[in-house]
Amino acid sequence: MLPAFAYARPGSLREALDLLKDAASAPLAGGTDLQGCMEDGVARPARLVSLAAVPELRGLEVRPDGSLRIGAATPLAELAAHPAVRQRHAALARAAASVGSPQLRNQGTLGGNLLQRPRCWYFRGDFPCARKGGGTCYAQDGRNARHAILGGGRCVMVHPSDTAPALVALDAVVQLAGPRGARRVPAGELFVGPERDVRRETVLAPGELLVEVLVPAAPPGARSGYDKARARGSFDFALVGAAVALVLRGRSVERARVVLGGVAPLPWRSRPAEQALEGRALDEGSLAAAAEAAVAGADPLAENGYKVAMTRGIVQRLLASLAAG
Amino acid sequence: MSGEASAGAGPGAPEPWGETRVVGKPLPRIDAWERVTGAAVFTRDLTLPDMLHAAVLRCPHAHARVRRVDLAVAARRPGVRAVLGPDGPGAAIPWYPDREGKPTSRLLDPDCRYQGEEVAAVAAETLAQAQEALAAVAVEYEVLPAVTDMERALDAGAPAVHARGNRQGERFGYSRGDLEQGLAQADAVVELTTRSACSVHTPMEVHCSVAHWEGHQLTVWDSTQGVFAVRAELAAALGLPLSSVRVVSHFVGGGFGGKLQLSKHTVLAALLARAAGRPVKLALSREETLRCVGNRPPNRLTVRAGARRDGTLTALGLEALGTGGAYPASATSGLLVGDLYRCANVRTAHDNVHVNAGPGRAFRAPGVPPAAFALEQAMDALAEKLGLDPLELRLANLPTGSQTRGLPFTSTGLERCLREGARAFGWREARARARDAGPLRRGVGLAAGMWGYEGDPRATALVTLLADGSATLNTGAVDIGTGTRTVLAQVVAEELGVPLERIAVENADTGTTQFSPPSGGSQTVLVNAPAVRAAALEVRRKLLGIAAGELHAAPGSLRLEGGAVVTAAGRRVLLKDLAGLAERVSLVGVGERAPHPPGKLALPFAAHFAEVEVDVRTGQVRLLRLLAVQDSGRVMNALTFENQVHGGVVMGLGFGLTEERVLDHATGALLSRGWHDYQLPTALDAPASIDWLPVDPHDRECNSVGAKGLGEPAHIPTAAAVANAIHHATGVRPLEAPMTPPRLVALLARARS
């Protein structure tokens, strides 16, 4: 049952930020993650600050230079259906389209998808785990089929977002606003791994809001995509996800971004996989090499060794579809 | 149509139907409007005046002893009207009987053997107040070591779930012929071991009870599959005469076996209601239903199978390990190994162990889908070894009766299920065009199945024809969502010619309706429809007697249709215009279900055919199509029949592909606490088309309506058929269910290296 809470509905960003100075307040966008966090006792806000009427968080525009400005409160469904996003930033549209279910995509927002809390069943359950301030990562030696094969350590959660790897691959930048003003952070620097701070997943400071996401224009020869393997046909987080953004010059890969989801505590940029592609044609050899490189350094736990094979498979499948045009 | 007594469908049963006018048609449910508009009141929806809401304090440990419970503070919290702890009245009601009927626990047991076991309960004005009060209950636990893995439960030094050990009774089994000799006679032998995870019933409507006392009379609205079963258990638990307990269950949002028995929350609601002097509702949360009200036990099954070169089976062996959880519950089934195929040498052995996990309950053909998963994969492997088409191997070993019970079947539709299914599916062509190169592999598989319960024939129904020509049907049968009410009303319409929309059904209320066994075991239609038919026939006889007198015709020359009596000459008289009927006000018929045919068994059969596409890069399986061929005798309603098949198949896909209860081995804590981590299949996991093909052997002996069971046989072979299709597509044997992408991608990677 949802615990009791107060509710506020500010009409501007300034007003919202004022309300969020109170540490017992939490921002409410789509609420699809927050509600579960409250039910599980992972979040215990005394007041929810609705972002529904904050105009600065809304809107999805294609700017004259071809870049995108996406308000953080943009529903995932809108992003997934937007013709320009689908055409020029396919990784983002595909990622948004693969989140949850139609209801969740109508309700859930891009900002919420980036900032959602881990799905780890120990974190969400009644375990005083490291991420909740305890001393132990229970998944490390526990039931860890869905956990990290890369970048684990003090916490082996996996980052659950589909859109985060896509935005990192597309070199997006996020705009934050807080009590101490606004700042811009590259999407790749938004996320925090457990070795840096095991208690949080992003660089957002208390009271800070994600306002908008800026995606640079797709250069000529750009191709991108997102693919994920999940345990059932829909309504599921990625067991392994991958976002790839390529710039092709003729048949050759000039620039590659390969970012994995579902395998590490944060969106995992695989530079070895990128290097395996850059300067080569997209052919069977480079695909296989990139797939192999993507799992370089993987250190599976007792129950998630399959993720090594699955990551290779997803990277290869996605690259094959990009090679096919 | 009418029928007189004959020996065909059992002693005293009327002649079976030939052609039918209403029965068998694809008729929408008579309560469809209520269901789709939300007007239907399920127990979960019920609100009584002055009703309190209850919540249960559950043990957070998988194994612990409650040293002390202090309810004093909780009892003083705002809104709290009643509290109940392990020392309270009724807390010592015996619970969880073992095979000999001896209780192994009590309603509120200080020895908690799984995470979620009931410790105390509170009733308050609101649910929020009840939960707040629970947080104020002080409990001192002595935490004990737990065991959750059934394969470790018998290890030396494993924590003891019960003082007398972790074995649930002695090893049991069955034997005929000589297994070892049969294996020695075989030209090919296979042995394989399957493991299937624990899955949970997850009916759409959570378990819920509302208890209301009026003096010494207790009425309980319960989301249950059997109102009479719950009444008997509840009256015994509370020491009340049966006549003092009334159990009602009008609309039920699914059961699947998880609502066949009395649950603790029902007794707690009754005890709290008595203490508070007010009605009490106790609805379990989804998480509670995932912990505490049953599951399909995990199984480890080793099958050995041997056959001669021509496919004749010479040996079938089963070594079964299962766990009913912390308390006695059946865990494995020997039905298929013993009876699905003709085989002279069979031996089964079953071990059932205790672990610190929620107790099992009957789950849609208890133990049989896991057994099909094992046996039907072994049959496939055997066919492969012999170089036979899997279809031919099965056809070479068709049974004509139950070899374990020594009784012939009234009808055996298995051969037709296999042959007609193979034709409709295009089995041979599909096998030939399987794709075995590239990342997407296609394959087909089939599996057979049967169900072994013939039903409890003790059912009574009342049919009343009213003066205006409308009719009522009174039956104790619960409609758990399968369309029981509609199918039974069709039987009345068939015999009396009264339009379906003029028939009202009153059902599942022990205070006002007649005895019926629980809606489970695939018995609902085959037990109740003959009782309803007998009642309708009695009314029919009375009505035709009246009409014959008024119309100066012989009763046998009259027909009943469209709410009228029709003479041989074509004269129509509306029932409401019959003076004799108006004078009598109503005509009542009492129908009792005839006994089963002596010395024979009426059982349903099935064969499922699946085509899959496996992405060998990720282990993802796409169901391209699935054909369910069912010998369930007569199709009573083509729509509800199709619904049952769809539900059975999708649930089979859940068992086979996605569903798994996950426990933390170190603490015994439940990790799959909700819909995210307990994964039901979605619409996208089902094939775009689930095809179904009924095979009706026109069984004139099984009962007076010719129907056999459907709910369970529609579920039994699905996962096994998919497993065989995956093997056909990829060459790897998926021996663990659910066959998730993680398991399959690991298997495929291992096979490559």
Image: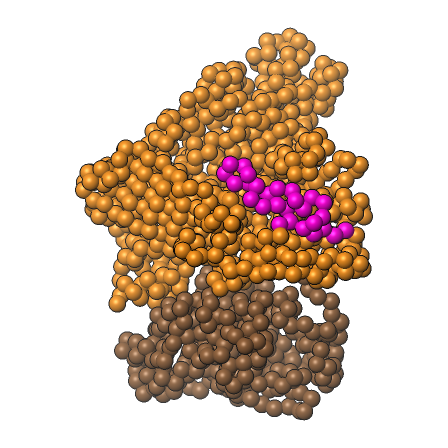
Chain colours: A brown, B orange
Residue A67 appears left or right of B738: right
Q: In the rendered image, which quarter is residue B452 located in? A: top left
Determine the residue positioned at 70% across, 49% down. B87
For residue A75, above or below residue B336: below
Q: Main secondary structure of the magenta part?
A: loop
Viewer-closest of A67 and B37:
B37
Give coordinates of residue B320: x percent, y percent: 38, 46
For residue A265, above or below residue B12: below
Name the quarter where the N terminus of chain A is drawn. Answer: bottom right
Viewer-closest of B713 and B640:
B713
Viewer-closest of B635 and B65:
B65
For residue A53, above or below residue B604: below
Give coordinates of residue A130: x percent, y percent: 55, 76
Determine the residue positioned at 59% across, 63% down. A103
Which residues fall within the magenta stretch?
Answer: B82-109
Give coordinates of residue B126: x percent, y percent: 76, 56
Residue A47 appears left or right of A202: right
Give coordinates of residue B311: x percent, y percent: 23, 39
Q: Would residue B268 be seen by someone viewing this image from the given angle?
A: yes
